[in-house]
Amino acid sequence: MIMLEQPSKHSGSHRRSARTALLAVLASAALLSSVPGLAAPAAAASNDVVSGAVVDWRDSPRGGGHSTATAVSSPASATQSKGVVLIDTVLPYQNASGAGTGMVLTASGQVLTSYHVVKAASTIKVTVAETGKTYQATVIGSDQTADVALLQLKGASSLTPVKIDNDKTSVGDKVTAVGNAGGTGMLTAAKGSIVSLRASITTAAEGPVASETLTKMIETTADVVSGDSGGPLYDVDGEVIGIDTAASSGSEINGYATPIQRALGVVQQIRSGHESSTVQVGPAPFLGVELSDASSSDFGYPGASLDESSGATVESTVSGAAAAQAGLEAGDQITALGGHDVTSAKDVSALLAGYNPGDRIKIVWIDQVGSEHAATVTLGASPVA
């Protein structure tokens, strides 16, 4: 889970008092032992901007920072569960796993979810809430900048799609967020209302999920938690108006959702087969490294000083993938990729977006004793795409 600190704002109700909130991208860490609690931002704002600190978004040996808030929700009804799926992923790093939610778009098994739910997954298992039937899934296209991914369930047929809203959405409208809260495998529903249609959020990089800025998001008072990502935000008619994407953290909770029509625009482009600078169709390039942001203080080799340039720290590599074949190991710092300087994990993600599986790319890195290395590798294909 990725969490972001938001400045304090004052609101007109006791539940919307001045606060310091943390915003979390809601891919669950299949957090069965500790589900992060999330807190609510202020009342309607024309352009809330959120940025801040990192908390692990998935179940990994390194864990993450979790607050103690508890979401206010109830079991989802049969109607609210129609067309909704529960997503479980395995990542090829440190035996990590994750959980999220998705929405059926077609009877033949196309599913819409948040990109960060499935990014870098080696396997994706999708369970249809209505029937309990489980399918393996592949990513057929995505847009990281919009945090949208389109999946295909293998062998699926006769599924019930969600109902999409085509009406105007307004501040004050009542909504319900449904999702796989906490990765428990049970759908829950959290009620609230819309407080903004123009919220902007900036996530912090964590693990395989790079930092992203999302604008014109739907901000609601619905108490959503880790695992809800990719789930539907319903209006009072039970129609989908958005994709649950992020939430604040603390003693109270607010949710952020990607407008559904924006997401469907990405889906339409993926279906057309036309890639762009942001939309990836088919397999994504795969370097096979889990990265975190490096700072000058991360350089632990003899003679390192605070004026050393930063890069992206290799947390782990996937055996047999391009990075491991080149000789990169945990603790190394990637400083350049494809002829461009690297100062963060986000830089690596952004640079790889311009490549396809099979392309060759030069990597420059510094090992833990301070020696610089360079190698040209052939990028693989994302394991699930």
Image (cartoon, rainbow, N blue to C red):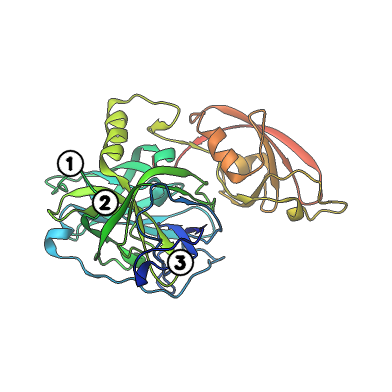
Q: How far, Cα to Cα, is label 2 from label 1?
A: 30 Å
With respect to residue 378, does 59 lie above or below? below
Residue in view at x 84 percent, y 51 percent: 305
Mark drawn on residue 187: none
In this image, 119 relative to 239: left or right?
Answer: right
With respect to residue 218, does 32 lie above or below? below
Which of the 4 image quarters holds residue 39? bottom left
Residue in view at x 69 percent, y 53 percent: 331
Find disc 3 in the rendering and name its residue.
18
Tag 2 or tag 3, which sits nearer the N-term?
Answer: 3
In contact (CB < 8 Å): disc 2 and disc 1: no
Residue 17 is situated, as x and y percent measured from the top left of the image, at 41, 68
Q: Secondary structure at mark 3?
A: loop
Residue in view at x 52 percent, y 46 percent: 210
Q: Amino acid at mark 3?
A: Ala
Tag 1 or tag 3, which sits nearer the N-term?
Answer: 3
Residue 355 is situated, as x and y percent measured from the top left of the image, at 51, 29
Residue 313 vs residue 194, the one in the foreground: 194
Image quadrant where one finds the C terminus: top left
Residue 206 vs residue 222, the one in the foreground: 222
Which of the 4 image quarters holds residue 227? bottom left
Which residue is situated farthest in the right direction here? 303
Find disc 1 in the rendering and name its residue.
106
Q: Amino acid at mark 1?
A: Thr
In contact (CB < 8 Å): disc 3 and disc 2: no
Structural crowding at the residue carrying mark 1, measured as other residues with C-alpha within 10 Å and reported as few (<14), some (14–19) or many (≥20): some
Tally the numbered discs. Answer: 3
Find disc 2 in the rendering and name its residue.
171
Q: Amino acid at mark 2?
A: Val
Tag 1 or tag 2, which sits nearer the N-term?
Answer: 1
